[in-house]
Amino acid sequence: MAKGLIFDIQGYSVHDGPGTRTLIFLSGCPLRCAWCANPEGQKIRHSLMYKPQLCTGCPRRCADACPAHAIIPRSEGEGLVKFDRRLCDTCDSMECLKSCYTRALQRSGRWYTVDEVMAVLNRDRDYWGPEGGVTLSGGNGSLPRRCSSAAVNRSSAPVLRAAGTSCGLCSKKSRSTCSGSSSM
Ligand code: SF4
Ligand code: SF4
């Protein structure tokens, strides 16, 4: 069964294609641009996001909860804790998330089946109107080819229109599969 790693889904977008749209952010990009607006979507794996503006410093419960001791208090710089990203980037348990009540720590990225994506699209479709539809973004909207093309193909039926945003760095096959049913 085709699955895609998605790091966010946003409804009611009016800036990413014609009409009103549902935005699906697919994880994974071969580039590492310094100006990337969504760096949490660059890797093809889940990752830990830290939102310093939500961090109260509490008694640093997250540091106690991390079995790898990857969280270190800090007194200067952005945020009240910092992370050993080499450890976090290979962590599957993400035990620290359960300890943070302010949601300063969040998981970015979850594997969705095409059916799960379609359930979200079917929830949203009433407000798209005649011009709107689905936009695949990222990350690189054309990279996880099997899932994104399956979602686009299934959503291209009667009332949906798909659009994609991509850095363009992908195989010819990926590009033609996606662009065959969407505007990129
Ligand atoms: S548990 Fe959350 S609020 Fe407390 S120090 Fe850690 S990130 Fe900040
Ligand atoms: S993601 Fe894993 S390694 Fe990183 S702070 Fe959380 S529990 Fe520790």
Image (spheres, helix red, strand yellow):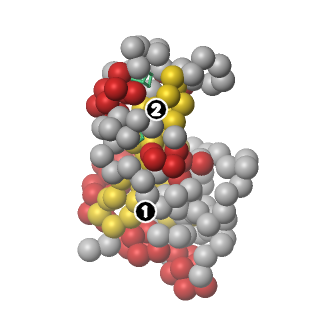
Res. 137 visible in picture: no
Mark 2 closeness class: few <14, some 14–19, many ≥20 residues within 10 Å: many
Query: What is the quadrant of residue 141 in the picture?
Result: bottom right
- Residue 35 in the image, given as x and y percentages of width and height: 73, 47
- Residue 39 in the image, given as x and y percentages of width and height: 60, 48
- Residue closer to the observer: 33 or 16: 33
Query: What is the quadrant of residue 99 in the picture?
Result: top left
Query: Relative to 121, is 34 on the left or the right?
Result: right
Which mark identifies residue 71?
2
Mark 1 closeness class: few <14, some 14–19, many ≥20 residues within 10 Å: some
Which three-letter amino acid code belongs to the residue tagged 1?
Answer: Leu
Label 2 CB sits under 8 Å from any ligand 2 atom? yes
What residue appears at the point 53 percent right and 52 percent down from the top-left corner?
41
What residue appears at the point 41 percent right and 75 percent down from the top-left corner?
146
Q: CA distance from mark 1 to mark 2?
A: 45 Å
- Circle 1 is placed at which residue position? 160
Q: Which quarter of the rendering shows the N terminus?
A: bottom left
What residue appears at the point 39 percent right and 14 percent down from the top-left corner?
59
Query: Relative to 169, is 107 on the left or the right?
Result: left
What residue appears at the point 57 percent right and 22 percent down from the top-left corner?
74
Which three-letter amino acid code belongs to the residue tagged 2?
Answer: Ile
